[in-house]
Amino acid sequence: MNKKRIGKFIAKKRKEFGMTQTQLSKKLGVSFQSVSKWENGLVYPGIDILPALARTLRTTADEILEGCERIQDEMTYKKAGVDILYMDSIKNEMINVMNFANRYGPNEIVSYASLYDVNFNNIDNPILLLKTEDPGSKQKLAIEYGYTEAICHDLINHLVNDIVVMGGKPLAVLGTIVCGDIQRDKLKKIVKCISDACNDNECDLIGGKTSVYPQVVEKESYFLCASAVGIADRKNVIDGSKINEGDIILGIASNGLHTSGYSLVRMLMDKIPEIMTEKIKEKSFVEQIMNPHTSYYHAVKELQGKEYLHGMAHITGGGLIGNLQRVLREGLCAEIDLSKIRILPIFKYIKDKGKIRDIEMLRTFNMGVGFVLIVSPDRISEVIQTIPQKFSCYEIGRIISSEKKVSLIDELKWEEKEFD
């Protein structure tokens, strides 16, 4: 790049619009001296100011850096929908909205990879837990109805639960945003919301990737994904091996669908579109189904490492049936008393509107139980008292000896009840 040529080009474009150097500096929020230095070829305009400078002079960042106007029909990456310089300026702003509450290592947007210090003096035999997740088809509804903040919390809370369920503590998250076009405010909001969700779960958003695919993803649309790393002492890893016959199964309440069953819900919405505005317990249908996935980290972190906590399950796709099967060894069976499950009103509404059988509901949704603890029978009261009051925790079954992994007894009680 030629500083003198760039300076002459900036001065030429400024004069075409009849602006003085002082007027240009005020429009850009920079000093008069900065504009003077650019035009005299002493320094380059900073990459953070280039997009605003290009918009003010009605040119492009590429033309400014080349110091000349491009041929009208010339093919460029920007014309294809990707403005690298503009994207870089947004990435530099992202660092300001990322909350490094417990930073372990220096990270900058320009780094090729994120750094994380793995010095864990308080853990005798550390083992890492790794997980990648996306919010599923719920993202489509989040984009359509403006639930950006909620879907960011869905993403992180789901990830954290999958770390916690194995006895780990979440440490760091790498996020991915794939979008169809560059929208500065939306991208900053997404990064801020993901960072806030990480902070709520006592972990850090330490980096990630933002990509623009204009021919692949629709304009104003985006796709989120993230990976998390957690840490546990090897002796405290919960893999189901300590579960015994006679253990009690405790359910911790969900706040709705979390991130499972949305393909079925969207099919129901297409069939009966008027349900979107109908009210269920003072909230519209869309408000009910867009409740963010509950994080159970703060509910169970005080139980981690306790000898009487034998197993846990995060109830996602597959419901109680599918997820309890994942944590039980051969010869043990989770006997679930369906009559004890405290069904949320949104599930009854979906069942009635869609004419869905009970077994299909159980395989698709969490039905009001978002997390499960499997504990020694003599410590039930202690465990329930340890769970913070805002997380409703109650007994839903027990572990028995059987070749069948999950056994369902009694029936779901669909009548509305008030629970403590």
Image (spheres, rainbow, N blue to C red):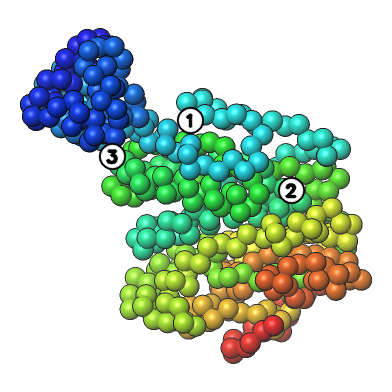
- Residue 251 x, y percent position in the rendering: 72, 71
Q: Look at 48% across and 47% down and name the residue there.
A: 192
Lateral position of residue 123 relative to residue 391, left or right = right
**What is the quadrant of the C terminus in the image?**
bottom right
- Residue 185 x, y percent position in the rendering: 35, 46
Q: Inspect the image, locate mark 2, and give the three-letter code of the amino acid beneath it.
A: Gly
Q: Residues within 10 Å of mark 1 (few under 14, many from 20)?
A: some
Lateral position of residue 231 relative to residue 4, left or right = right
Q: Inspect the image, locate mark 3, and give the three-letter code of the amino acid beneath it.
A: Gln
- Picture quadrant of residue 272: bottom left
Residue denoted by label 3: 215
Identify the disc placed on residue 109: 1
Q: Inspect the image, locate mark 1, and give the three-letter code of the amino acid beneath it.
A: Ile
Lateral position of residue 63 relative to residue 113, left or right = left
Q: CA distance from mark 3 to mark 2?
A: 40 Å
Residue denoted by label 2: 168
Q: CA distance from mark 1 to mark 2?
A: 28 Å
SS under mark 1? loop
Residue toward you, 30 or 130 = 30
Residue toward you, 249 or 400 = 249
Q: Height in image: 20 above or below 291?
A: above
The answer to which of marks 3 and 2 sits earlier in the sequence is: 2
Q: Look at 46% across and 57% down and name the residue there.
A: 149
Q: Look at 33% across and 78% down and name the residue there.
A: 274
Whether residue 282 appears in this view of the structure is yes
SS under mark 2? loop
Lateral position of residue 191 relative to residue 305, left or right = left
